[in-house]
Image (cartoon, rainbow, N blue to C red):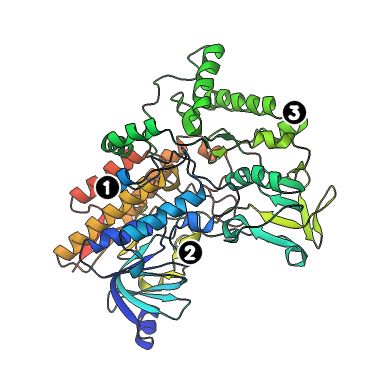
């Protein structure tokens, strides 16, 4: 008798559903709406007390989306598209959370969501061919389909800093910022981390605080975001052609309608012309700069021209050239870590109440009762902010203690790095579907586009199983290995492996270094998923 069978024989489920969804962010909300249309019973569980996922948890100062609002929205309801209006080109966390709540209300989603509930175990019962899902509230759900929509960046990373428990002031992680906010007026603040979260929050915190110490280990490239009000003319034009924009998103590399990338190398033009092109795209804001030539992601020499252009922008903005050089990344090609979008980030270092501390040269030794000590000295402050990111992509899944067939634990299956088929399924874990899981475009695509594509594919697969009266589906080992090999081959063709990024798990001590998202392009990926389904779910084992 397997461990799974023993567990199910001694523990009785408290409720049964056809499907259970973990998470009520954008992916979980759309999955709930879509699965209802299948006529199956479905329940979602959510750790927070409200919907919104990323935009529920990340309430830190300055939190903002890094793609245009008109793009970062649901496409499944044309009526919703036309009725909703964004106030800014790049929506703030506050507005995105309002949008999420509007969607939940409009489609009456809350009645099927159990809030303040965290999944603590998920075990496949081979005797019944159902999943047993345990929660921290004592529930044990029996379900046929187990869908994880826990998000790629939801497992908070709090490094094991020596002495953190001794700190006598208040400390906060940016992804667990209090709903009521934090009044930093007159406070001395220390912030650790200059990734996307730190870069967004530092300008706002510097305006509020009496003094701000920024502890930077790794400088990151950041490009200007546009926080200006939405242009009514642009909004009207988008709404008039929304279907065309959506169609273009589905065949694009990153799920965004940004037009085609010019078919020329950055090395094919003169330095003067190249800089003119970079300036044009830089002024557009957002990720446009990386679309200016066709080889910035594959040719190190070409990439360096774009990297140096941005470094020169930093040098021009920051008055203290020693600080500017610390802020100018030199240890990775531009775009190989997630590009940050900022609002006046570099200019913030011209203020009198901010100090940049290089903790790569002088590492943090410990947190003290009154601040922080590096190998070079001590810094005193009243509030500590950890902008230290997440155990990305695999962390949210592994923290659920998932056990598949034959008692195989997902954490053991993925000990050397995640293995999936299409980023949607895992061999040995029947009827478990991972929305934007490792091996899919995931964080390299516009997330609303990525989750809709995944949810639609999963819904169609479930519909096929139900129509054919099939009990389960799981990928074959051969199909999974072939997909993992392809994901790695494509990644090896790019410059991404030149950076120690969270794409590779490099920010988590002891985590296997494997490039997790699929970088072959969202359009190609969707085509492959559609092809698999059209061929009778090629690569899957379907059973009665």
Please tell me which residue is depicted at 50% across the width and 21% down the height of the picture: 280
User: Where residue 255 appears, x then y in whole percent?
Assistant: 37, 40
Q: Is residue 377 left or right of residue 395?
A: right
Q: Nearer the viewer, residue 279 or 420?
A: 279
Helix, strand or loop status at disc 3: loop
Q: Which residue is mark 3?
A: 319
Camera-nearest label, 1 or 2 = 1
Query: Going by the picture, which residue comes out furthest to the front?
Result: 232
**Disc 2 and disc 3 in contact, CB within 8 angstroms:** no
Q: Which residue is mark 2?
A: 398
Query: Going by the picture, which residue comes out furthest to the right?
Result: 377
Q: Cα distance, mark 1 to mark 2?
A: 38 Å
Q: Which residue is mark 1?
A: 79
Camera-nearest label, 3 or 1 = 1
Question: Sequence-wise, which precedes: disc 3 or disc 1?
Answer: 1
Camera-nearest label, 2 or 3 = 3
Helix, strand or loop status at disc 2: helix
Helix, strand or loop status at disc 1: helix
């Amino acid at each position: 008798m397997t461990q799974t069978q023993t567990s199910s024989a001694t523990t009785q489920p408290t409720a049964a559903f056809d499907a259970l969804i973990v998470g009520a962010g954008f992916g979980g909300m759309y999955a709930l709406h879509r699965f209802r249309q299948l006529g199956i019973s479905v329940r979602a569980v959510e750790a927070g007390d409200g919907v919104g996922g990323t935009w529920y948890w990340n309430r830190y100062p300055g939190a903002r989306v890094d793609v245009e609002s008109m793009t970062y929205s649901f496409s499944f309801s044309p009526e919703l598209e036309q009725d909703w209006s964004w106030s800014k080109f790049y929506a703030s966390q506050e507005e995105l959370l309002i949008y999420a709540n509007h969607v939940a209300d409009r489609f009456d989603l809350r009645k099927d969501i159990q809030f303040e509930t965290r999944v603590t175990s998920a075990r496949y019962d081979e005797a019944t061919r159902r999943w047993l899902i345990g929660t921290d509230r004592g529930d044990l759900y029996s379900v046929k389909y187990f869908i994880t929509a826990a998000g790629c960046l939801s497992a908070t990373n709090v490094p094991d800093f020596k002495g953190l428990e001794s700190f006598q002031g208040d400390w906060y992680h940016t992804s667990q910022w209090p709903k009521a906010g934090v009044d930093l007026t007159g406070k001395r603040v220390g912030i650790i981390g200059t990734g996307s979260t730190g870069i967004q929050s530092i300008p706002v915190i510097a305006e509020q605080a009496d003094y701000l110490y920024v502890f930077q280990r790794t400088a990151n490239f950041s490009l200007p975001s546009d926080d200006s009000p939405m242009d009514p003319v642009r909004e009207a034009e988008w709404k008039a052609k929304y279907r065309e924009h959506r169609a273009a998103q589905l065949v694009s590399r990153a799920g965004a309608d940004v037009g085609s990338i010019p078919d020329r190398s950055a090395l094919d033009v003169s330095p003067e012309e190249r800089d003119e092109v970079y300036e044009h795209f830089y002024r557009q804001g957002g990720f446009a700069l990386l679309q200016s030539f066709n080889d910035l992601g594959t040719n190190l020499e070409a990439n360096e021209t774009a990297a140096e252009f941005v470094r020169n922008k930093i040098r021009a903005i920051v008055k203290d050239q020693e600080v500017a050089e610390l802020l100018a990344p030199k240890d990775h090609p531009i775009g190989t870590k997630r590009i940050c979008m900022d609002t006046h980030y570099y200019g913030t270092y011209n203020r009198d109440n901010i100090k940049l501390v290089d903790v790569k040269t002088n590492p943090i030794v410990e947190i003290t009762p009154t601040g922080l000590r590096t190998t070079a000295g001590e810094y005193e402050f009243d509030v500590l902010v950890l902008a230290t990111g997440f155990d990305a992509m695999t962390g949210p899944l592994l923290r659920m203690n998932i056990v598949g067939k034959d008692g195989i634990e997902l954490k053991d299956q993925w000990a050397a790095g995640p293995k999936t088929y299409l980023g949607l399924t895992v061999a040995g874990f029947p009827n478990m579907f991972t929305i934007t899981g490792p091996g899919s475009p995931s964080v390299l695509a516009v997330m609303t586009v990525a989750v809709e594509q995944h949810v639609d594919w999963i819904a169609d697969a479930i519909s096929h199983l139900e129509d054919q009266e099939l009990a389960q589906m799981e990928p074959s080992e051969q199909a999974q290995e072939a997909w993992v090999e392809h994901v790695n081959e494509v990644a090896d063709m790019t410059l991404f492996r030149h950076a120690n990024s969270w794409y590779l798990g490099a920010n988590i001590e002891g985590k296997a270094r494997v490039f997790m998202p699929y970088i072959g392009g969202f359009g190609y990926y969707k085509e492959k998923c559609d092809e698999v389904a059209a061929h009778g779910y090629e690569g899957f084992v379907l059973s009665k």
